Amino acid sequence: MSNAPAEEIPAEEIDLTEANEVIDKYLTLPGNLMPVLQGIQEAYGYVPKPTIDLVAERLNVYPSQIYGVLTFYAQFHLKPRGRFIIRVCVGTACHVQGAERITETFFGRLGIGHAETTEDLRYTFEKVACLGACGMAPLAMVNDDTFGKMTVQKVDEIIETYNARPMK
Amino acid sequence: MVNLTINGKQVAVEKDATIYDAAKACGIKIPILCHDKKLHPFGGCRMCLVEVEQMKGRLIPACTTPVTEGMIVQTTTDEIVKARKLVLELLLLKHPIDCPVCDAAGDCDLQNLTYEYKVNMNRFVDEKFNHEIDYENPLIERDMNRCIHCGKCARICDEIVSYGAYTFINRGIEAKMGTEFDGPLNCEFCGSCVSVCPVGALNSRPFKFKARWWALQKTKSVCSYCGTGCQLTLGSKDGKVLTTIYDENQGFHNGQLCTRGRFGYQFVNSDKRLTTPLVRKNGKLQEATWEEALAEVTSRLSAGKSDPASVAALATPRLTNEELFLLEKVFRGTIGTDNIDHSAGFAHEALTKGAVASFGVAASPSEIADIQKSNLLLVVKSDAYETHPVIGFEINLGVKRKGVAIRIVSDKKGKLTRLPGAKTTVHTPGSEVALFNALCKSVIDQGLVAEGVAGLDALKAAVADATAEKAGVTAEEIAAIAKDYATAEKALIILPIGLGYPGHNAALASAAGNLAILTGKIGKEGSGLLIMGEKNNSQGAVDMGIYPKGTGLAASAIIDGCANGNVKTLFVAGENPVVSYPNRKKVEKALENVEFMVVADLFLTETAALADVVLPACSFAEKNGTYTSLGRRVQNVRKAIPAVGLAKSDFEILSAISQALGGARYNNQGEVFTEIAATVPAYKGLSQAGLKDEGAVYPVSVAAKLVPVQAKAVAPAAGKLAMVTGSALYHCGTMSRFGEGPMYVCPDAYAELNVADASALKIAEGDQVTVTSATGAVQVAAKVGKRVPQGVVFSPYHFGEGSVNTITDGAEVTYVTVAKK
């Protein structure tokens, strides 16, 4: 049941230059809202609130409708995302292979839950339904790297590895 | 036409009709939850499922399926009933059964259908929603737990209101009707969403827990705010108006209302209503009996008969036609004075002088229905939306549904400028006449003049030196508008008038009329000029002759007469010159000076406080009569509740005065209407009974004539901002201040500045600022935005505190300085 409170979106000051460039690119294209929002997300890593107001103003679309689109598609994010996106499969095969323990361990180690981001913006954690590699269950991915036959020990190894990686 | 059979009945309908429309046309009811005749078909609720012989094997939604020739439709079979029951069961799975405390009970489509389909058990079990209820705004309560996701609120807000406050947010089971960032509702609060909500998810907060729906007495009447003449149904109980009830079959607007119409009714039962006459004794207004008060008034007026020039009357165009007719008869007939006027004199000039000169009638040559029939609308000031919001809805519909092009010439941007394809030309404040002259010149230069236009040479000479620069716009813009306007097959000019628009005068009406006549856009459906009177009966006041016709004094001269002693007795019926006429100080001084002033009003207004006798008058809900709206539609106003306190209607007051002065006697207001129909040529043949619910548009015969007008030179003052006045969306005149709804949303006077000016003056949103003109200074809150261009300040005029007329003197534009307090 959706009883989640309205997402707390912090007021932020951002440079709108890139957003304006994206809008310029698609301005005359019919049905341009999706490519514009995708372009903005690519540029900023997420869709910052000030860009929604900008898109509303420049494309003459209601801000409410933009918000509707952004919350409908799982591909859009309204909050900054981590440098490393950890995705743990909880699909059928991974589930029977103990994916629950893997996710719980990540939660404990990182101090975040599903679809949350660490304060230092290093990690975002997501449970996903299937990554299409059931033979390697239980499976985890960090950005484009794949980790099959996951164990609780491997969780610590992964975190250690990516803690050492640079943020940029 | 397409022929089909529904439940064995033959029916022929238009080819763009749906099965639902066809069933409705032959009297067969198909249940609906998400469908609304005003909105595009949605097909979301699946209540309207029917069987179609040619589409066997599945049930077909009637509201989205177009009819085809020979279609055979069944609307109630066992299978259909079963499917509808399932839909209801699924809806009731989430919908709380809190009908005993729900304000929609009795008027709830879901409740009614559940009853009709006898859904007394549910095969499914699930948790209810647990959404937080939005109590953030004072007018609309949003309880999304009761929402059945019909989407009507989002669609009406988009399609008709064009605000777009709502949308479906999230996905799947988590989907709900929400707002931007799922925040509290923050919109125009017109309440259209409340009116179409089929359940109790959206409620009117002022009506909450006031009465059960079935206990309300329902009275069809006409809104008493602006000149649009929206019909409404008042819901009353125990002598109080408790709400307005939505009726989708009322009026040209299909029951649509704006904030003031829907939520502004509370002034009727306001605690501030005058309930007893007041007479000034020892310098103080004290309670008195009607006999005492009327005796004083009639003795003064009776004495005035020997010196009629010393008597004057100012009447509000909020009174009924019958009351205004009687007032005119008492003052012009019985007393013999021509000193009668309304709306500060200037606010009706576009009709009484401009339209008379250009079209030979003191009325708009066009009607409201022309808006949607036009090809191009030329709107003077974006304010058309603020002054007449429901006309704004008509414009929205015309532009978005019928593809009507829209050009706006304005001194600021507004909501209409955001319509698809809208082109807004922002001109120098006060240069409207110059702009229309430049348009006329451009039409002539581009060779777009219609054939056989008489008096062309005089106009040519008059506009010879009209240039776009004089209106502060480019020659290209003028040429483009002139071309679009002249080449459109049908084009309509929309011109709002009122106390906030001193520049919208006779000259502007004629200048706009010239453009229409020059291009042959007069006397055709969907074309012409729609002059939009500010108040509910502005057109009626003109028709009843509430303005000086001979040597009488106009409103400003009456005020001057009060100041210099020439006017000794002033009768004020509902007007509030202290707040609404230009130059407050001057008006106050004059009204303090006049020997004897009697004010009949609902409230102890700023003007009434200066009176010698105050008579408590009735609101529109307490009387019968007629109003004439801006499209010349005469409509019945009906009594919903008994008079508040000892209040008497202006008809009763004037009737008593008339009798005491030996004038005409009438037993009831209906007799006056009979006389109006007999003596006012335009109203010939009308009767109150004949007006029925829909009213009647009286015809005009237009004798169009070019009337060259000279534009006043606009002289911007160096270092000063140009202040323009006008109407705030939530208010109309000074009466809406006594309605809780409008006051919740917009309680105080403000000055709206451009962000650039504001930052240069170091003014932030909400700061208290002092606005100073040559006439005076006033303190108001600042509003900062991009709507007004740089160098311009906008301020609405409705408010008593910080009233903008403290600093205006009747000029089109007031040059001011703005400083942070």
Image (cartoon, coloured by chain):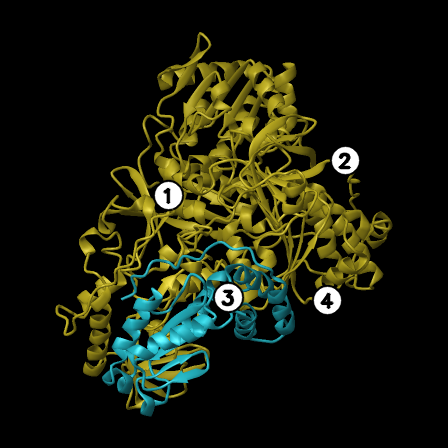
Chain colours: A cyan, B yellow
Cα distance, mark 1 to mark 2? 50 Å
Image coordinates for residue A137, horizontal then vertical, percent: 31, 87
Cα distance, mark 3 to mark 1? 54 Å
Q: Which sits earlier in the primary sequence, circle 1 or circle 2? A: 1
Q: Is residue B202 above or below residue B558?
A: below
Cα distance, mark 4 to mark 3? 45 Å
Cα distance, mark 2 to mark 4? 38 Å
Image coordinates for residue A1, horizontal then vertical, percent: 27, 66
Choose top left, top right, bottom left or bottom right for residue B490. bottom right
Quadrant for the C terminus of chain B, please.
top right
Q: Which sits earlier in the primary sequence, circle 2 or circle 4? A: 4
Please give the label number shown on residue B717: 2
Frontmost of labels 1 and 4 is: 4
Q: Chain of mark 2?
A: B
Please give the label number shown on residue A47: 3
Q: Amino acid at mark 2?
A: Ala
Pointers 3 and 1 in contact (C-beta within 8 Å): no
Please give the label number shown on residue B487: 4
Q: Amino acid at mark 3?
A: Val
Frontmost of labels 1 and 2 is: 2
Instruction: Judge if badges 1 and 4 mark residues of a common chain.
Output: yes
Taking the image as shown, residue B477 lies to the left or right of residue B77, namely right
Name the one closer to the observer, B211 or B762: B762
Residue assigned mark 1: B638
